[in-house]
Amino acid sequence: MFNRLLRGGRGPAGGGRGQGKGGGRGRGGSTKPGSGPGGNCVCPKCGHKMSHQVGQRCLDIACPKCGTKMVRE
């Protein structure tokens, strides 16, 4: 392995750290809709909207009008 590092080649598959296609973004990404503290929770059945509360998932909230689980807008 040390010789391969000196030559600068990657060698056979499985010998390196991977292809590096993850881009270093980590889990989840921060540009997806619904990420971050702001936004609204909306009922997929009746359309009722309410502001998203930090620390509480929209899926854990029941719609006050019809009781359906809310989703993030």
Image: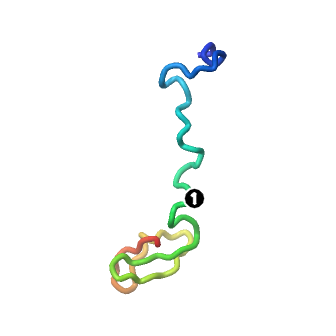
Mark 1: amino acid: Ser
Q: Which residue is located at x 66 percent, y 16 percent?
A: 6
Residue farthest bottom in this picture: 65
Q: Disc 1 designates what residue?
A: 30
User: How many marks overall?
Assistant: 1
- Quarter occupied by the N terminus: top right
Is 42 left or right of 45, judged from the image as shown?
right
Q: What colour scheme was applied to this rendering of the protein? A: rainbow
Q: Secondary structure at mark 1?
A: loop
Instruction: Using the image as rendered, state which of residue 57 and residue 34 is in the foreground.
Output: 34
Is 67 left or right of 9, judged from the image as shown?
left
Q: Which residue is located at x 53 percent, y 51 percent?
A: 27
Query: On the image, which quarter does residue 44 sit in?
Result: bottom left
x and y percent of residue 31 in the render? 56, 60
Residue farthest right in this picture: 6
x and y percent of residue 67 in the render? 34, 80
Q: Which residue is located at x 52 percent, y 79 percent?
A: 51
Q: Which residue is located at x 55 percent, y 26 percent?
A: 16
x and y percent of residue 69 in the render? 37, 74
Is residue 7 placed above or below 58 in the rendered structure? above
Mark 1 nearby-residue class (10 Å; few <14, some 14–19, many ≥20): few
